[in-house]
Amino acid sequence: MHAPPNPTASSERGPVLFINLWPTSGMKHYSESLMHALTPASQVIYVRNYGSCVEGEALQVRLNPVRPWGLGDLWRIVRTILDRRPRAIHLNSELPVLLPLFPLFAFFNSVITLHDAVPHEGETLAKRGFMRLHLWMVAVFFRKVIVHSEAIRAQLPEYLQSRAHVLPHVNYQLWARAKQPPPESGPLVVLFFGRLLAYKGLEYLLEAFRRLDPAKFTLLVAGEGELSPEVAQMPNVRVIHRFIGDEDLPGVFNQAHVVALPYVAASQSGVAYMAFAFERPVVSTAVGGLADVVRDGFNGFLVPPRSPEPLAAALEKMADVTVRARLIENVRQQNLSGDVEIREKLLAVYRA
């Protein structure tokens, strides 16, 4: 499938129009961090439906990414595009409400970041169908695709792979300014963080904890979603069963010594980058792009998916203070992409 024609309406001196309409959690963390990196050196119009800690020009809208609310604001976006002639229009992830504007985007230097190329395990047929339709529309109307691992690029349809640019994931230092060391005494606290979805493999982490000494290990489950009441009855499990807002992030991550990602399938996870921002090593399954982020024996440990015994063994290794101290120091020193590198590589994609 051919790319859309060369953009004719973009202005090389115009601003970048960046759009994110997912107002909470990972997509907001990603967008805020990316804008924090980009705005100091480039003129950006940040289109969003939430408050922001990033200074700069913004277009505040009432649009909902998946529901027909505030549709009049679509015209405000169109008018901004026609008036300002942006040098790039950059969408963060799938935004169904913007599908009617895709034909307009084709006349500009259109860019989209795809965080997932295939549906997660357990997704509905409707979501799977939408993802196929969306990828086809991206192929028709967008010139460039940004992904954050070779694993995700390999999952894209062949007709999109040639347009995909693999960029480092933005770092999340912006959200970890209140980080503190974990408790020096007591059991090793292992954090499972985020929405409780089937593909994240919590059941295998719980099975691993049944093999561990309750006096030496505590599992902290923090997030919203379906959770069996029996989980909270386990002797070495604590549960914060609700949505974790931005203001609560430090209070949750600062309790933990280690973050666990026992996913059975994944393209990537912002939780890993949040863990590193809080200087916590990670125990992860070697699935998707996670194996590119968590380096076995360097900033964490990798284990096979759906394997409670190796997962328990990796957590046992984390309980060794010397081992954990080495991993933490590596987390501090590792070459996570800084704001300057992110900015330069993103601007290079816009220019390409």
Image (tube, helix red, strand yellow):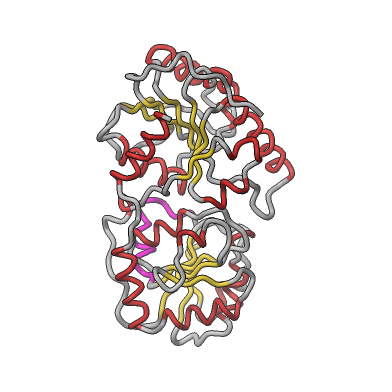
User: Is 38 in the magenta?
Assistant: no
Q: Which residues are magenta?
A: 243-256
Q: Position of residue 60 (x, y in %)?
A: 39, 27
Q: Residue at x 44, y 68 (%)?
A: 282
Instruction: Determine the image quadrant of residue 14.
Output: top left
Task: Answer left or right for 187 relative to 125.
Answer: left
Q: Position of residue 293 (x, y in %)?
A: 45, 59
Instruction: Determine the image quadrant of residue 54.
Output: top left
The correct choice, above or below, for 346 with respect to 319 in the image is: above
Instruction: Determine the image quadrant of residue 347.
Output: top left
Quadrant housing the N terminus: top right
Q: Nearer the viewer, residue 329 or 195?
A: 329
Q: Residue at x 51, y 17 (%)?
A: 107
How many numbered discs? 0
The correct choice, above or below, for 276 with respect to 184 in the image is: above
Q: Residue at x 38, y 16 (%)?
A: 11
Q: Position of residue 134 (x, y in %)?
A: 64, 34
Quadrant housing the C terminus: top left
Q: Position of residue 67 (x, y in %)?
A: 59, 32
Q: Nearer the viewer, residue 301 or 232?
A: 301
The correct choice, above or below, for 85 with respect to 195 in the image is: above
User: Is 253 in the magenta?
Assistant: yes
Task: Answer left or right for 9 relative to 154.
Answer: left
